[in-house]
Image (cartoon, coloured by chain):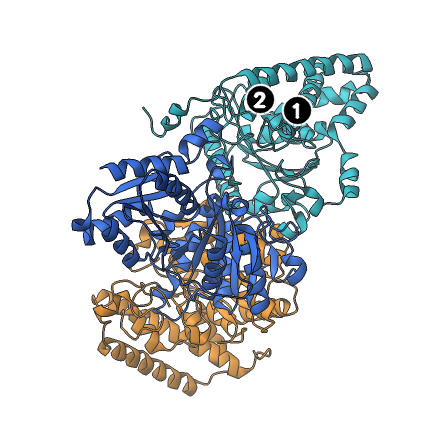
Chain colours: A blue, B orange, C cyan
Amino acid sequence: MAVMTYLEAIRETLRQELRRDNRIIIYGEDVGVRGGVFRVTEGLQAEFGEERVIDSPLAEAAIIGTAIGAAVNGLRPVPEIQFADFIFPAINQIVQEAARIRYRSNGDFGVPLVIRAPFGGGVHGALYHSQSVEAFFAHVPGLKVVIPATPYDAKGLLASAIQDEDPVLYFEHKAAYRSLKGEVPDERYLIPIGKADLKREGKDLSIITYGLMVSYAQRAAETLDKEGISVEILDLRTIRPLDVEAILDTAKKTGRVLVVHEDNLTGGIGGEVSALIAEHALFYLDAPIMRLAGPDVPAMPYSPPLEHAFMVTPDKIAEAARKLAKF
Amino acid sequence: MADNSVTPELQKDIYYHMALARALDDRMWILNRQGRAPVVYSSNGHEAAQVGSAFALNRGEDWIVPYYRDLALVLAYGMTPREIMLHLLGKADDPNSGGRQMPAHWGLKRRHILTTGSVVATQDIHAAGLALASKILKDGRVSVAYFGEGSTSQGEFHEALNFAAVHKLPVIFFNENNGYAISVPARKQMAVMDVAARASGYGMPGVIVDGNDPLKVYEVTRQARERALAGEGPTLIEAKTYRFVPHSSDDDDRAYRSREEVAEWKKRDPLTTFEKYVLENQILSADEHAAMQKKIKETVNDATDFAEKAALPDPSTLELHVYH
Amino acid sequence: MAGSDALYGLGLDAKKIETMYYYMVLSRALDERMWILNRQGKSAFVISCQGQEGAQIGVAAALDPAVDWVAPYYRDLGVVLYFGMTPRDIMLGQLAKAEDPSSGGRQMPAHYGSRAHHILTGSSPVATQVPHAAGIAWAFKLRHQEAVAMTSLGEGSTNQGEFHEGLNFAAVHKLPLLVVVENNGFAISVPQSKEMAIQDVAARAAGYGIPGIVVRGSDPLAVYQAAHEARRRALAGDGPTLIEIKTHRFTPHSSDDDDRSYRTREQLTAEKKDDAVHLFRHWMVEQQLWDDEREKALRQRIRGEVDDATDYAEAAPYPDPASFLGHVYHT
């Protein structure tokens, strides 16, 4: 057991998986010699060679499209998209191909593929290095979307994603890379995809969230605890498939629900979570469901006051929770 | 492994598959006009390019990633006429997709035919990916992507060729250039005469071949395959051919090309040309030819009857195969 | 003036040569100041033109900013200065202030754009600007305007599908377009040999049926000549030209990168010997177009401009947070 950053947990999992299964290959822009622009893959090419840790040409559709072909032909590709914002040139390959191949071939073909991509803002990344893109993909049956919130989960979920027989998008919040630390067991373990994690028990209200926002919600909960507001936190871990049971359980228990994400409000996961609760747990609620999310502007601006205005913070979460508790 | 010599047996086999493909194709149009098949995409006119290249491969072992025009190709690659007709009619036992996809969206793992979608040029990258795995796994397979000239305007064509060239992958990019992307002629598609001219921009050979001559296609494909297996990387083959029918049963080609143009190309119909060749050179005797025609007719009838009687998919299967 | 016949043959006079040199030196000086601001913690991010000034000014000088449009990429400080952005404009963008003409502080630095200066706004995903520039050129053609579009990109970006689609489209329609590849040999850390299996990006031109030209970026006049000829062809209705400029990146990819992991110091030292700013100055001196006194005066002037721009931008206000909901749609 070692204390690791979120980034180290991902790197060490990749290393462990590459050692475990020689069908796994990693590739993407700058992942080899440079070890990735965030250094997530640092040292992996030195250990596993250029044939398994590959610097690809600058072409995202080619990265995902070749990964599909390689997966069909017996490898387990784990390509990286350098920033989630750059995934769009490959959306045709991900949505139209990877997600549909099993269905369209009536189960004859499958695409075991994990696409890793750093996402999220608050890192001076502006419009094209800050985006949260998960909702686009969560809309697509055939894909799975995983967003770990802790170093421990980063490891167990990544190992599960690599073991999965279907395409998995694995999003890593850039601000979590070095700011989140935690204990990570040395041995391999799997965290099931589609299972949420009850991070904190409480009785007054539930915060349902995922990714970096989980730790922000925890900070808000500590503040609120001192004010006498008891907060329950559900970490979704996976936004497709959603853990419907866990969502309904916490909603029924506290009767007040705040859904939090950094992704844009409209059409975000919060809408789906809210709809599930409205459909299946409406009469348990003591207050309308509340959403706190990134505002409906196309992407995050760069200049510090604008970036701050966009970001969801522990303070903003605490403020929203206070309002909900008072309803 | 593929037999490299052009034996009489091989030539007979090529002719048989070309003729069978044409006959199946003709039957599909009849079924369409009778209202029994909603849509048809043809290989009519492309048979030499498709069958000639297929026989140069290690059929069923090398990967092919076809496009919608490749009926003759998948037939030569081991998909049975019954399977093809099941697909056309969207029946439950269609091995391509269980009736989920439109006709001519081929895919059969048993014969190493990768499933294909409708968005053109996506398959070029998949072929590169299959070849990436073959290179790493050292499995001795090559991959071949088949595509029309219109799809070479797509970014994915470019990305696939570049990726394959950088990594010297065992892949062949096989272009069936019939001069039209639905209604758009090649001169409005690209400012070059030959798709093969693009190869030099990736550092790979670009080969132009008469796509109406199956033996020439066989030869260039065989060479490209050897090159791929020798670790020398990809080849772009451009087979110049013509489509004798509209783009699909929903198209009317009179709007965009003259009957004279079609008639001119018909003089070089690959099927009649090759038929003449095998008969004149006594590769195929008149008796053998007659027997073959009879067999083809029976095979097409059998496939049609079989598929028509086959069950449609059960609606309860709608939600299957979303995930593993 | 010795050697001036050659210059006049290019349609250049001494004044224009000096103007080109001024913009090269100004680009370098502004860029160097940005790094200082970054290291002082005053600017979060820098991405440089250093090493590419000769390429950028050689191209820009062959265009007519009054009528032509450019769709540059993030290294094109020289191009946007030549097209009319002021040092103050640049520093306002660098420090993300409200008055930043490119984006009002919304985009990262070096994401240039200004309708007034005929500079199309750009994003971070590479090669998206190639189809845009083809579209601008198409509009020129359809409106029978005597103007061209120029787009520039790095060699790594030529592997994107959008490069291919944009170039093919422009070639089919014979559009008045210059596609300029500033080939500095690296896509962040990935060397050209791992990006493509060819020596020259210009070799791709043959696949589109257009000319592909290779020039050295340390020779701004050769660049100018190639761009000038490409513009002439474009205006004559002969279609686009692909110009590949062999150049250098003297800095890491950005202030967040460390190039020591993928480029030896020896290689960098060798590259720095091929510096257009120094070589052009030597050439001007040889041609008796330039001397130490003029150099000193120029440096002083530019120092003043850079200081002024820095002071102005530092004192300028940040955007009002309330403004961040604006411009999502037309109002």
Q: Secondary structure at mark 1?
A: helix
Callout 2, which amino acid?
A: Met
**Can residue A312 be seen at all in this image of the molecule?**
no
Task: Judge if badges 2 and 1 mark residues of a common chain.
Answer: yes
Badge 2 crowding class, 10 Å Cα cut-off, few under 14, some 14 to 19, many 20 or more, is many
Q: Residue at x 57, y 44 (%)?
A: C158
Residue annotated with mark 1: C33
Horizontal placement of C203 versus A99: left or right? right
Question: Where is A186 relative to C101, above or below?
Answer: below
Q: Quadrant of residue B320?
A: bottom left
Most foreground residue, B12 or B152: B152
Q: In the figure, B263 relative to C100: above or below?
A: below
C244 w.r.t. A9: above or below: above
Judging depth in this view, the residue of B265 and C132 nearest the camera is C132
Check if mark 2's residue and mark 1's residue have beta carbons within 8 Å: yes
Residue at the far left in the pictured view: A283
- How far across and down, in percent of the image, does residue C322 sit? 38, 24
Counting labels gives 2
Q: Residues within 10 Å of mark 1 (few under 14, many from 20)?
A: some
Identify the disc placed on residue A309: none
Q: Quadrant of the C terminus of chain C?
A: top left
Name the residue located 70 percent from the left edge and 47 percent from the top edge: C261
Q: Position of residue A81 (x, y in %)?
A: 51, 50
Instruction: Find disc 2 in the rendering and name its residue.
Output: C91
Quadrant holding the N terminus of chain C: top right
Q: Secondary structure at mark 2?
A: helix
Distance Cα–Cα, label 2 vs label 1: 9 Å
Which amino acid type is shown beneath numbered disc 1? Answer: Arg
Instruction: Tell me which corner region of the image, top left, top right, bottom left or bottom right, holds residue B19.
Output: bottom left
Residue C311 percent location from the top left of the image: 60, 16
Residue B251 placement (x, y as % from top left): 30, 55
Question: Who is closer to the viewer here, C34 or A182?
Answer: A182
